């Protein structure tokens, strides 16, 4: 969601006011089934602060009805969340003397992992020099004592990282296979403008203008886990060195070659592959 304030009342939006609005909004959403949240403050080209916030909502929540003296269960469907957020934001800003329009607020559903990664990539790519976060673009009263510019609830459940060792030959082939999948996936987009843009991005996904970085640049697109597993299985079936079992086979094979006085070139290549697998 993007929560905005009127530009013509910019002088009234101090850091204290903005953080008070955020705090009250978070408390309200928690009472209405919010599980987790992230937020960040950015500034428009006209130096007006606004809030980007992502929230995880429960499917339903309970609210105490003081007249019936019992809890009422409410569904948290998309339209209900949008309505609750916009109405509450207008109520909070009005209490601060800020006349905000409902048409200026943007609340949308982030549907699935791919949409979420697109969302965080959009905001994560902006550094402190980006005009929406640059100190020079902040109003004078914000430059000293602006307070926290971002926050989250620190309770987001995350999965453990998985490490799959592979040598550079397998890594480079994995990137090529990933690019093929991305191009095929982009070709299925119905909208012609989005399809053309996605195909161009997929084709350029492995490019890098710096040779020293190009060799080790990872895949820079979102790939579903099942697709990743399929690519890895296909590469393993073709003899690429991927996985801890492949690493153990390489160690045993290298020991056998040393004991039997096998090809020095074969030992050199195998030793290089094992070292590359350890670096992953």
Image: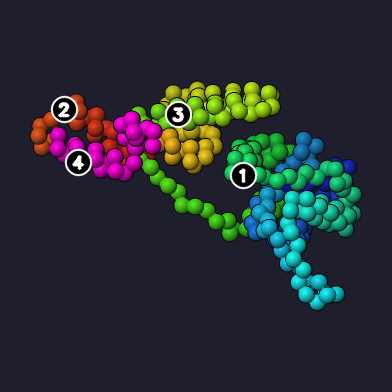
Which residue appears at 52% of the width and 53% of the height?
A: 158
Q: Earlier in the sequence, mark 1 or mark 2?
A: 1
- Please give the residue where the numbered disc 4 appears in the rendered image: 252
Q: Earlier in the sequence, mark 2 or mark 4?
A: 4
Residue that label 3 marks? 177
Q: Which mark is residue 112?
A: 1
Front-most of 3 and 96?
A: 3
Residue 227 relative to residue 145: left or right: left
Q: Nearer the viewer, mark 1 or mark 4?
A: 1
Labelled disc at residue 264: 2
User: What is the CA distance from the residue labelled 3 to the residue labelled 1?
Assistant: 23 Å
Color encoding of the figure? rainbow
Q: CA distance from mark 1 to mark 2?
A: 51 Å
Label 2 Cα crowd, 10 Å radius (few <14 / some 14-19 / many 20+):
few
Mark 2 falls on what kind of element? helix
Alpha carbon distance from label 1 to label 4:
43 Å
- Residue 11 position within the rendered picture, expressed as x and y whole percent measured from the top left: 85, 47
**What is the x, y in percent for residue 211?**
44, 23
Q: In the image, is residue 222 above or below residue 59? A: above
In this view, the residue farthest toward the left is 260
**Disc 1 secondary structure class:** helix
Segment tinted magenta in the rendering: 233-257
Residue sitting at x 80%, y 45%: 105
Residue 234: in magenta span: yes
């Amino acid at each position: 969601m993007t929560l905005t304030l009127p530009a013509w009342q910019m002088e009234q939006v101090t850091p204290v006011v903005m953080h008070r609005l955020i705090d009250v909004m978070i408390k309200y959403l928690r009472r209405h089934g919010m599980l987790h949240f992230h937020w960040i403050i950015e500034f428009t080209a006209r130096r007006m602060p606004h809030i980007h916030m992502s929230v995880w909502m429960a499917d339903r929540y309970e609210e105490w009805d003081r007249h019936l003296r019992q809890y009422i269960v409410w569904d948290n469907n998309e339209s209900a969340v949008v309505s609750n957020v916009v109405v509450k934001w207008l109520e909070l800003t009005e209490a601060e003397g800020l006349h905000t329009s409902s048409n200026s607020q943007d609340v949308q559903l982030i549907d699935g992992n791919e949409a979420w990664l697109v969302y965080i990539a959009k905001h994560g790519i902006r550094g402190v020099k980006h005009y929406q976060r640059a100190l020079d673009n902040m109003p004078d009263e914000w430059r000293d004592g602006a307070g926290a510019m971002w926050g989250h609830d620190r309770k987001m459940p995350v999965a453990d990282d998985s490490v799959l060792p592979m040598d550079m030959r397998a890594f480079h082939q994995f990137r090529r296979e990933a690019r093929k999948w991305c191009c095929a996936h982009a070709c299925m987009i119905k909208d012609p403008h989005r399809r053309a843009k996605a195909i161009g991005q997929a084709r350029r996904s492995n490019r890098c203008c710096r040779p020293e970085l190009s060799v080790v640049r990872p895949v820079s697109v979102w790939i579903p886990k099942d697709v990743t597993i399929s690519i890895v299985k296909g590469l393993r079936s073709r003899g690429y060195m991927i996985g801890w079992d492949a690493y153990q086979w390489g160690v045993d094979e290298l020991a056998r070659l040393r004991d039997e006085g096998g090809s020095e070139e074969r030992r050199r290549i195998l030793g290089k592959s094992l070292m590359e697998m350890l670096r992953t």
